[in-house]
Image (cartoon, grey):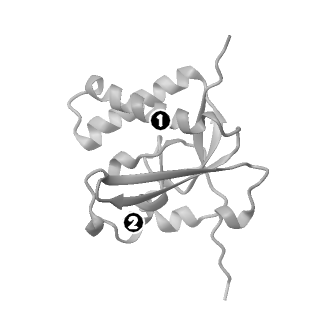
């Protein structure tokens, strides 16, 4: 019996991610919360585009850029293994993990956490994350919006030409 595995892919309904993140993720990237990036941050770090990435950015696993929204999708188990390795390599390249082998358990935990977040929502459900700094560290909250229930004003930033 095959187990259905779900993760989330970055989605865009407009160009706002290009304007609010230093490095926006491309549409369709597999994503994780990526809260680990902020583990040593203080209020002084939360300015401008960095604040936006902290407040509600998911981490794309191709560009390692940020996205405001992700959608739940089915993923092949073999692809999950590739994503774990890619994230472990990122931990070595960017965060100084001593080796890929040493980083694999942390990468696996990040992917497992994302799989847990995607377990209950149906495919195509939109997920949003919000973060805040507390005295005990970062607090993350997640919300799922069923694709059939989503209204544009729940997920899009509206502007006028005036």
* Label 2 residue SS: helix
> Where, quadrant-wise, is the C terminus in this rendering?
bottom right
Q: Which mark is residue 124?
A: none
**3D distance between C-alphas at marks 1 and 2:** 23 Å
Name the residue at 74% across, 49% down: 147
Residue 137 at x, y = what percent? 31, 53
The residue most toward the bottom is 162
Residue 36 at x, y = what percent? 35, 46
Residue 5 at x, y = what percent? 61, 26
> Where, quadrant-wise, is the N terminus in this rendering?
top right
Name the residue at 48% across, 55% down: 57
Image quadrant assignment for residue 87: top left
Within 10 Å of disc 2 (Cα), the crowding (few <14, some 14-19, many 20+) is some
According to the image, label 1 marks what residue?
113
Of mark 1 and mark 2, the one earlier in the sequence is 2
Residue 104 at x, y = what percent? 34, 26
Is 160 placed above or below 124 here? Answer: below
Q: Are marks 1 and 2 in contact (CB under 8 Å)?
A: no
According to the image, label 2 marks what residue?
51
Name the residue at 26% across, 42% down: 95
* Label 1 residue SS: helix
Comparing 78 with 106, the one in front is 106
């Amino acid at each position: 019996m095959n187990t259905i595995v779900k993760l989330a892919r970055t989605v865009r309904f407009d160009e706002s991610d290009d304007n609010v993140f230093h490095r926006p993720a491309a549409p369709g990237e597999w994503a994780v919360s990526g809260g680990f990036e902020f583990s040593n941050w203080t209020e002084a770090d939360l300015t401008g585009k960095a604040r936006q990435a902290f407040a509600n950015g998911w981490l794309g696993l191709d560009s390692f850029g940020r996205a405001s929204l992700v959608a739940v999708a089915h993923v092949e188990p073999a692809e999950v293994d590739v994503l774990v390795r890619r994230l472990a390599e990122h931990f070595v390249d960017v965060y100084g993990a001593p080796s890929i082998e040493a980083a694999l358990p942390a990468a696996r935990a990040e992917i497992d956490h994302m799989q847990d977040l995607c377990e209950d929502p149906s495919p195509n459900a939109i997920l949003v994350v919000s973060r805040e700094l507390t005295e005990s560290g970062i607090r993350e909250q997640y919300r799922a919006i069923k694709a059939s229930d989503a209204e544009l004003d729940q997920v899009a930033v509206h502007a006028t030409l005036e």
